[in-house]
Amino acid sequence: MRALRGPFFVACLTALLASACDAPPSAEPVGAAVVDLPPLREPLPDAVAETVRKLRDIAESGTYRDMASLADATPDFRSNNAGMSHKDYWYLKMRAGDWPMAQAEKLLGYSYTVADSPQGRVFIWPWMATLKPRQITPAAARDIDRLLGDGQAEALRRGGVWPGYVLGIAEDGTWLYFVSGSG
């Protein structure tokens, strides 16, 4: 034991403590490589922002009829209406406890993504609905599970079909679709 108190021990202990207190070799913040954020959003064009405002107004104080009226303004508007009018379909959804206005409002609370289509650019809510299974990052998984329920991100990673709603607005402000289970 006496040898551990000698000059050699003190020198070893001093060297060990000095190296333990050295700054990390990189000036980057710890964990910088694993930060995962939703995609950056470009500002909405005025026409898209106006359609979003209309949808939010309907969600706040309108009815399924108001929502159907807005959808009917687009000749080829798509929903899951299966041959019914949008008004009749959304009435049935409401009777089943799935309020379309609340679903639209919920989607518009998430970030969006922009996709190019033959008809031009389309703004799509929620941003994570367009991801392929290998593109589902931890941030996307958190948003997916918060929107759709626990375990849904993992189901999508295994190739499942998107079970939630998706909303699309063309760059000119035309509301193109509001579908669920779109895959």
Image: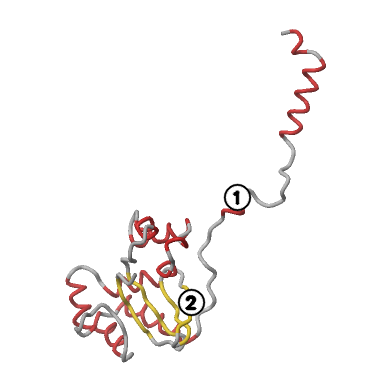
Instruction: Indicate the secondary structure of the residue bearing disc 2.
Output: strand
Residue farthest toward the top in the current orientation of the protein? 2
For the C terminus, which image quadrant? bottom left
Count of numbered circles on the image = 2
- With respect to residue 52, does 34 lie above or below? above
Q: Is residue 45 left or right of residue 102?
A: right
Can you give x and y, in whole percent of width and height, for residue 60 in the image? 33, 75
Q: Residues within 10 Å of mark 2 (few under 14, many from 20)?
A: some
Q: Which color mode does the image show? A: secondary structure
Image quadrant occupied by the N terminus? top right
Say what amino acid the circle numbered 1 marks. Answer: Gly
Q: Residue at x 53, y 72 (%)?
A: 41
Residue toward you, 52 or 30: 30
Residue 145: % across, % down: 37, 58
Q: Earlier in the sequence, mark 2 or mark 1?
A: 1
Residue at 34% across / 81% down in the picture?
A: 177
Residue type at mark 2? Val
Looking at the picture, does residue 86 appear above or below residue 104? below
Quadrant in the rendering for residue 159: bottom left
Please state the horizontal and vertical placement of residue 131, each as a whole percent of the image: 44, 67
Question: Is 27 displayed left or right of 57 in the figure?
Answer: right
**Which mark, residue 114?**
2
Q: Which mark is residue 7?
A: none
> Depth check: 9 or 160 in front?
160
The image quarter in which residue 89 lies:
bottom left
Label 2 – label 1 distance at C-alpha? 29 Å
Relative vertical location of residue 111 with respect to residue 33 in this rendering, above or below:
below
Q: Secondary structure at mark 1?
A: loop
* Residue named by callout 1: 31
| Left or right of 71, for residue 14 | right
Q: Is residue 138 left or right of residue 79?
A: right
Near-viewer residue (167 or 63): 167
